[in-house]
Amino acid sequence: MNAQLFYVDLLLPMSHKEPLWDAYLFVVNDRIAEFGKQSELPLSLKSHSPKKLTDSVILPGFINSHVHLSYDNNYSSICDGQQIDWIEDLVERSRKFSPEKKLQVAKENIQSCIKAGTTFVVENTPFDETVEALNYSEINSLVGIEVFGNDPLKSDENFEYFLAKLERLQSLHPKLSFTLSPHSPYNVSDRLLQRIIDFSQKEGKKALIHLAETDFESDIIKTGEVPEGLKSFYKNLGVSEPSINSQKGMSSVEYMHSIGCLSHNLHATHLVKIRERDLALLSLVGTSVSLCLRSNAFLANGFPPLAKMLEKELPVSFATDGLSSNYDLSLLEEIKYAWFIAKSHGVNLKAEYLFESITSVPAKMFCLDRGAIENNRKADFICYKIPQSLLKSLKTPKVCIYQFLLSNLSDEKLNEVWIDGKKIFPRVSSTF
Ligand SMILES: [Zn+2]
């Protein structure tokens, strides 16, 4: 048995629990056994010599609910409003990566995530090399195998292909969890989407999808027509064009609902191009949501109706998306941006909620026993260094601890990252 006792100035358990000053955290093997105030340390723990994390605050490790570790910074020729050019460039570029390059990009991205306090990722990838990199790393993950397939006549064949891929990867990598990630409603036929949702419901998994992200997606769904720019894209790739049998004028969310694919077992990312009725549908079925506000801004896609989402109590997490549409993979930077940009859209996001949205909220969405400091959860936690002078001012009555931390924390102040009860950053020696 490996038992470790930590003393820390401030511990934020999250999951709506009060911050604890002068706290202890007791970890046995890979799980949190107990935590509380040092003044109330149980007698049974007094024989353990504590590791003192001085001038520090502990939080649960962050969970990135939507990321692509396969992409590097691909600031291509995209101009505002030219999302089709961007997606073409991205696909062409990433397909040209050699297997070694794919592995290297994924490994570098995983290290960037860890150094920014992320201990669990929900990855979306078509590449086995990314899976290999995740298997090699201590970071935990749910891997969405990206599914493409527009040809309605090949829906069943395609489903069997991706299911076999999932089963193959799962048996090769039992440490990882896998699901299917149908890319978007315009890149997967309705029949293939239905088979994926059926499978997800039966297996108790979440299918991952990009939904209501761009204007061209809305246009394809609304009109059933494929824009000229995209026609050549599909032709060059040698794959079928979207063939959408929607009633004219439908939104992406309405289309998903009309084909029976809006589900509690669906996790939708972006939801920028949505209407009031879409929100009611999403809330009715309990689809969980990732918002990637910096990615939306990067691609000039707009801003989701955040105030209404919160009003409808949609489960919303914030995520980075991939480096192809963001400057870094830091969730702390993501929620800092969300805080500011939401204000400029008249939405006053609570700092506490923002920290929840990258810890306990995605943990609940994906049924993970992580994302909060709680007895018997996996011991994933991170530790930031804060000067004693700042800690003192935090103790002043009426200071909002979360808002203060949102303003004062940075990735550079991240001191330690623990996953499954093991310190993985900073390393004593590099094995990665
Ligand atoms: Zn994405």
Image: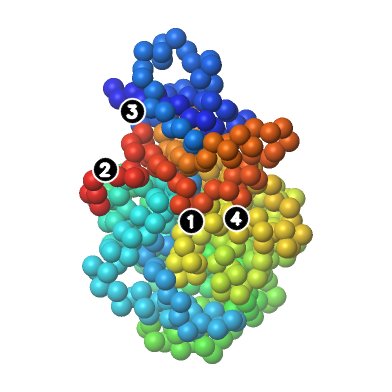
Work out whether residue 339 can be spotted.
Answer: yes
> Where does the image place residue 112, in percent across and percent down from the top left?
39, 57
Q: Earlier in the sequence, mark 3 or mark 2?
A: 3
Please name which of the two marks, 3 or 4, marks the residue nearer to the observer.
Answer: 4
Residue carrying label 2: 428
Q: CA gap, disc 1 to disc 3?
A: 28 Å
Please name which of the two marks, 4 or 2, marks the residue nearer to the observer.
Answer: 2
- For this rendering, which residue is in front, 62 or 51? 51
Q: Is mark 3 within 8 Å of ligand 1?
A: no
Q: Residue at x 60, y 70 (%)?
A: 297
Q: Earlier in the sequence, mark 1 or mark 3?
A: 3
Instruction: Give the left or right position of residue 308, taking residue 104 as reference.
Output: right
Residue carrying label 3: 29
Q: Residue at x 45, y 85 (%)?
A: 233
Callout 3: few (<14), some (14-19), or many (20+) C-alpha neighbours within 10 Å? some
Q: Residue at x 65, y 76 (%)?
A: 222
- For this rendering, which residue is in front, 165 or 340? 340
Displayed quadrant of residue 393: top right
- Seen in the picture, residue 394 relative to 73 is either above or below; the reply is above
Residue carrying label 1: 330
> Where does the image place residue 248, in percent across and percent down from the top left?
68, 77
Work out whether residue 289 can be spotted.
Answer: no
Q: Earlier in the sequence, mark 4 or mark 1?
A: 1
Q: Secondary structure at mark 3?
A: loop
